[in-house]
Image (tube, rainbow, N blue to C red):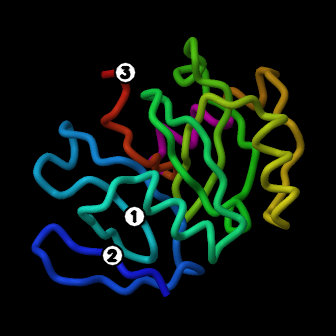
Amino acid sequence: MIRLMRRSGTPLELEASQVLRIRKTDPRLDDGLGNTLINAGQTFFVQEEAAAVAAAVKAELPSLYRFTHRIGAPVWVNVHAAKGPMPLAPNHRVPGLGSALDIGGKRQYVRESPEEVRSAIAAAGGDVQPIPDEGLWVQGRETLREILGSLEAWDEELTTPE
């Protein structure tokens, strides 16, 4: 059990095995909500710094893996609960963005390569997918999923570096 402090000053006890994702808060989305966002069935904001929260969770959840968010900050993901690597639609093929994975019903875009995403998920016993190709069929399918709204991304609003 991880013990943290909510922004309000009330304690939060969190079961590490429930954690899907951890990231530093960003003023564009989370202004004044605390220092760290934790997705674990629901969203929690806590006062502790993201790296400290991730270290505490990783001590009890070895499958917590540090990736690099598309804005350049670390994002820790429970790769045992992840599926990937996932293909990038053409509008997500931008410099600095290397791959994606699905976690908690949403897509997490990261800077790491599809091979690194696949390796991390495989090592933790997650849902390993083949390395995506860049064929027209794959790109078209991902674009269609975005248009139809069946693909929701974590932190979609954070499209530019700070």
In this picture, which residue range is highlighted in magenta?
A: 141-149
Q: Mark 3 is on which residue type?
A: Pro
Mark 2 vs mark 3, CA separation in Å: 28 Å
- Disc 1 to disc 2, C-alpha distance: 11 Å
> Label 1: which residue?
38
Mark linked to residue 57: none
Q: Earlier in the sequence, mark 3 or mark 1?
A: 1
Position of 10 with respect to 94 (left or right) is left
Where is residue 111? Give x, y as percent: 61, 28
- Of discs 1 and 2, which sits in the foreground? 2
Quadrant, the C terminus? top left
**Residue type highlighted by circle 1:** Ile
Residue at coordinates 44% horizontally, 63% vertically from top-left?
53
How many residues crowd mark 1 within 10 Å: few (<14), some (14–19), many (20+)? many
- On whether residue 144 falls in the magenta region, the answer is yes
Q: Circle 3: is it few (<14), some (14-19), or many (20+) Cα within 10 Å?
A: few
Which residue does the image show at 18% across and 39% down from the upper left?
Answer: 27
User: Which residue has dot 3 on it?
Assistant: 161
Type of amino acid under label 2 = Leu
Q: Nearer the viewer, residue 41 or 31?
A: 31
| Marks 1 and 2 close (CB-CB < 8 Å) | yes
> In terms of sequence position, does the residue under pointer 1 or pointer 2 come before the other?
2
Earlier in the chain: of badge 2 and badge 3, it is 2
Which residue is more in the foreground, 118 or 131? Answer: 118
Q: Is 91 drawn above or below residue 88 in the view shown?
A: above
Q: Is residue 109 above or below residue 52?
A: above
Residue for badge 2: 4
